[in-house]
Image (cartoon, rainbow, N blue to C red):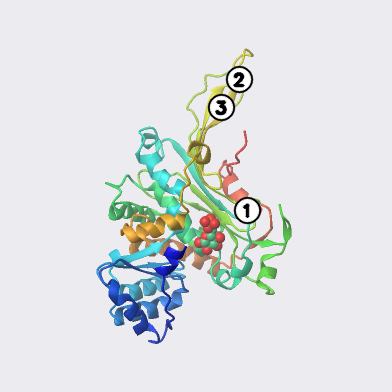
Amino acid sequence: MDRFIKIVSYVTLDAASGEGWSDLAATLVSGAGKIRAFYLAVGPDLFDDICARISEFGLVTPQTRVVIEKPIGKDLDSARKVNDAIARAFTEDQIFRIDHYLGKETVQNLMVLRFGNVLYEPLWNSAHIDHVQITVAESIGVGSRGDYYDTSGALRDMVQNHMLQLFCLVAMEPPESLDANSVRDEKLKVLKALKPVARDSAATVSVRGQYRAGATDNGAVPAYVDELQSERSDTETFVALKAEVANWRWAGVPFYLRTGKRLPERVSEIVIAFKPIPHSIFPTEAGTVHTNKLVMRLQPDEGVKQWIMIKDPGPGGMQLRHVPLDMSFADAFDNRHPEAYERLLLDVIRGDQTLFMRRDEVEAAWAWIDPILEAWNTARIAPTAYTAGTWGPSASVALIERDGRTWHEDTL
Ligand code: BG6
């Protein structure tokens, strides 16, 4: 700790005015050739001023990077403005737009599962995959972040960034290499191929919810509006969507996404649901032949489960069982794996942008989100109340069950 403290210095400055900036410049002078990472852990309304000052005071060297956090805008137009402001001071290869989901262990493993094995890729298309589910459930409420959250809502807070990034990694074509631009080029193609949500179909393919008071494992919890200390709010704390990718690989394969706060548990997972076998040779008494599923769990208990059919061992005739080949990372590897932010900050220092969002990706994601927001607005689709501690509004169950499918539940 002593050694660390010795290399830390602290400079106070005013983000908006020029005050304090020459002190910062003086502090940095001796390390002109060193890597410089400006991490803007501030609200986006300060990005413009800070970048302008960094540039004005000559702090941008060839070894400099800037790291920014979401929200990058609240729609396409404002995202472009934020990106323009940053681009006035930095080149695109110096800009690291963090999406901490990309730093999660299983998310990166998704690329290895897909492209480091011969097993899955031949099946990874509409001929063999029935549908995909992406769930990011949180048991926490908005807590003290209400001021920010109420201007955002689940669609902007989670779908526009984290969930669409997961979506891209599932749906993208094999990149030529792990090189940052090769990966990001492929993700961009997915975002561009997302079928726009038409205004008149928004009510069918999207569900908005907001939690009312309820209970979780830790006891009673208040409603969203009570946490906000407000009379009412039209912000969604839950969203479910049915999305489609209009290209050869994915035509006709629905992607169901859902995320929300105050759900029964914290669980993030991606489920690849394969199609049924074309013909069963087994007698009805043998039991149901369930479909294969590949479940990648991001958190907690990171791991991968491949659900398959086997014969129930024993002499009692042919009995079928649906069981997972279960790989829990905690059981299989005893080394500690870094938190997403540790890995991403190290990548900033290394100058590796593979796990960061490029400008065009962020804007393409907004281009898909904007019409949904507009449709909600014009068609006055308000959030439906759901009780805290449940899986969201019943319309979210209807969204998938209407298609003869069901949200994955991890039971034997
Ligand atoms: C943040 C959102 O980006 O991600 C929060 O703003 C959310 O609302 C958080 O709680 C979830 O991150 P994690 O890593 O806990 O799943």
Q: Residues within 10 Å of mark 1 (few under 14, many from 20)?
A: some
Q: From the image, which quarter does the C terminus lie in?
A: top right
Q: Name the spot of residue 91 as percent of width and height, x first.
A: 27, 69
Q: Amino acid at mark 2?
A: Gln
Q: Is residue 150 visible?
A: yes
Q: Secondary structure at mark 1?
A: helix
Task: Tell me the residue at 41%/70% (across/down).
Answer: 8
Q: Nearer the viewer, mark 3 or mark 1?
A: 3
Tell me where residue 212 appears, x and y as whole percent: 70, 62
Residue type marked 1: Ala
CB of mark 2 within 8 Å of CB of mark 1? Answer: no
- Spatial CA distance of label 2 from label 1 is 36 Å
| First in residue order: circle 2 vs circle 1 | 2
Q: How many marks?
A: 3
Q: Position of residue 404 (x, y in %)?
A: 57, 41
Above or below residue 53? Residue 352 is: above
Q: Is residue 274 left or right of residue 57?
A: right
CB at mark 3 closer than 8 A to ligand 1? no
User: Which disc, if any, is residue 319?
Assistant: 2
Label for residue 289? 3
What is the spatial separation of the Cα atoms under label 3 and label 2, in whole angstroms?
10 Å
Q: Is residue 369 left or right of residue 407?
A: left
